[in-house]
Image (tube, grey):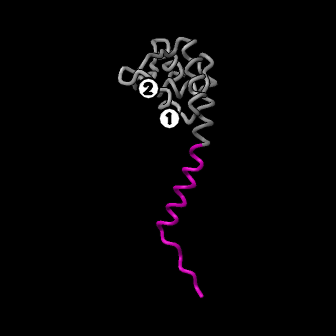
Amino acid sequence: MTVPAPPADTDRREAIDAVAGALVPAASRVTRLLLRRAPQRISRSDAGVLSALNGGPRRITELADLEGHAQPTMTLLVKRMEERGWVARRRDPADGRGVLVSLTEEGHAALEDVRAA
C-alpha cells in the first residue's frame, strides 16, 4: 500500500508555521539587544508604550491590550513614565470616566533616541 504524498499546500503551510514560530523569539532578541544600546535605560515595555502612543492618545485599557499587559500593570507603567515626564494623562472628553495617555515632548525625544540607537 502506498501513501499519497501530501499536497504542496501542506508543505508550504508547515514551512510558514516554522518560520513564523522562529520569527517571534528572534524579533524579541533583536529588540532586547537594540534597547541595551539605547542612550538611556529604557525597558521593552516602555519602548512599546512610547511607540503605541506615537500615533496619538490612547486609553490605558487599549495600551494594555496592545502591549499584552494586564490593566493594573499598564497603569503602573504609565505612572512610572509620567514620573519621567514621557507621558501625560488627562480625562477622556468623550467619556469622563476614562483616561487618555499621550506622549509629551520628552516622550517623543525618548522614542527618537531609541529609534536612532
Tags 2 and 1 touching, CB below 8 Å: yes
Rendered position, 27 above or below 109: below
Query: Looking at numbered disc 1 in the image, what kind of residue is underneath it?
Result: Leu
Q: CA distance from mark 2 to mark 1?
A: 10 Å
Depth check: give the residue in front, 68 or 61.
Answer: 61
Residue identified by numbered label 1: 66
Task: Tell me, yes or no, whether the highlighted magenta stretch contains residue 4.
Answer: yes
Q: Position of residue 97 (x, y in %)?
A: 44, 23
Rendered position, 36 above or below 40: below
Q: Secondary structure at mark 1?
A: helix
Q: Earlier in the sequence, mark 2 or mark 1?
A: 2
Query: Looking at numbered disc 2 in the image, what kind of residue is underneath it?
Result: Arg
Q: Residues within 10 Å of mark 1 (few under 14, many from 20)?
A: few
Q: Residue at x 53, y 11 (%)?
A: 85
Residue 84 as seen in the image, left or right of residue 104: right
Q: Residue at x 50, y 30 (%)?
A: 61
Q: Residues within 10 Å of mark 2 (few under 14, many from 20)?
A: some
**Quadrant location of the C terminus in the rendered image:** top right
Q: Secondary structure at mark 2?
A: strand
Task: Tell me, yes or no, whether the highlighted magenta stretch contains residue 53.
Answer: no
Q: Position of residue 112 (x, y in %)?
A: 48, 19
What is the magenta segment's predominant secondary structure?
A: helix
Residue identified by numbered label 2: 58
Q: Residue at x 53, y 33 (%)?
A: 67
Name the mark on residue 10: none
Q: Residue at x 63, y 18 (%)?
A: 41
Magenta residue span: 1-24
Depth check: give the residue in front, 22 or 99.
Answer: 99
Rendered position, 80 above or below 71: above
**Quadrant location of the N terminus in the rendered image:** bottom right
Residue 47 as seen in the image, left or right of residue 41: left
What is the total number of numbered labels drawn onto the structure image? 2
